[in-house]
Amino acid sequence: MAVTFQKRQKEMKRLEKQREKAERRAQKRLANRAQKQLPTDVATPAGDESAAQSDPNLPDSTPQN
């Protein structure tokens, strides 16, 4: 009867390791996605002109008469 218990313990340990490994992969995947999205979040969107208007070094887009 001890063999059955040992087999069950071994199977439970294997399943636990499998779950932990899947969790580590998921966390790594999320970290990689966040790292890839970071540069795009920092950049100013193309439609946002407020940043361009507040910079005095940029030429004014309105025509002056």
Image: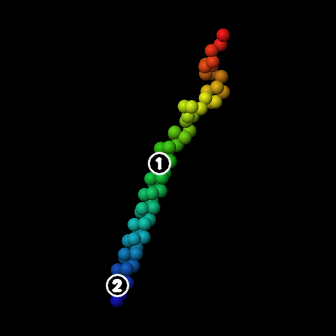
Q: Which corner quadrant of the image does residue 59 belong to? A: top right
Residue at the bottom extreme, as displayed: 1
Circles 2 and 1 in contact, beta carbons < 8 Å? no
Three-letter residue code for mark 2: Thr
Please name which of the two marks, 2 or 1, marks the residue nearer to the observer: 1
Residue 19 lies left or right of residue 4; in this view the side is right
Q: Position of residue 13 (x, y in %)?
A: 40, 73
**What SS does tag 1 mark?**
helix
Residue topped by disc 2: 4
Query: Image quadrant for the C terminus?
Result: top right
Look at the image and tell me in which quarter the N terminus lies. Answer: bottom left
Query: To which residue does mark 1 refer?
Result: 33
Give above or below for 61 relative to 7: above
Q: Earlier in the sequence, mark 2 or mark 1?
A: 2
* Residue 56, horizontal then vertical, whole percent: 65, 22
Task: Residue 6 in the image: state x and y as whole percent.
Answer: 36, 82
- How much space separates mark 2 and mark 1, taking CA atoms? 44 Å
> Residue placed farthest to the top in the image?
65
Q: Is residue 34 left or right of residue 18?
A: right
Residue 53: which numbered mark, if any?
Answer: none
Crowd rating for badge 2 (residues with CA inside 10 Å; few <14, some 14–19, many 20+): few
Image: 28 above or below 35 = below
- The disc labelled 1 sits on which kind of residue? Arg
Q: Compared with residue 4, is residue 35 higher up or lower down, i.e. above or below?
A: above
Residue 35 placed where, x, y %?
49, 46
**Residue positioned 47% across, 48% down in the render:** 33
Which residue is drawn at the image coordinates 37% and 84% (left, top)? 5
Colour pattern of the rendering: rainbow
Mark 1 nearby-residue class (10 Å; few <14, some 14–19, many ≥20): few
Looking at the rendered structure, the number of numbered marks drawn on it comes to 2
Q: Residue at x 40, y 66 (%)?
A: 18
- Secondary structure found at label 2: helix
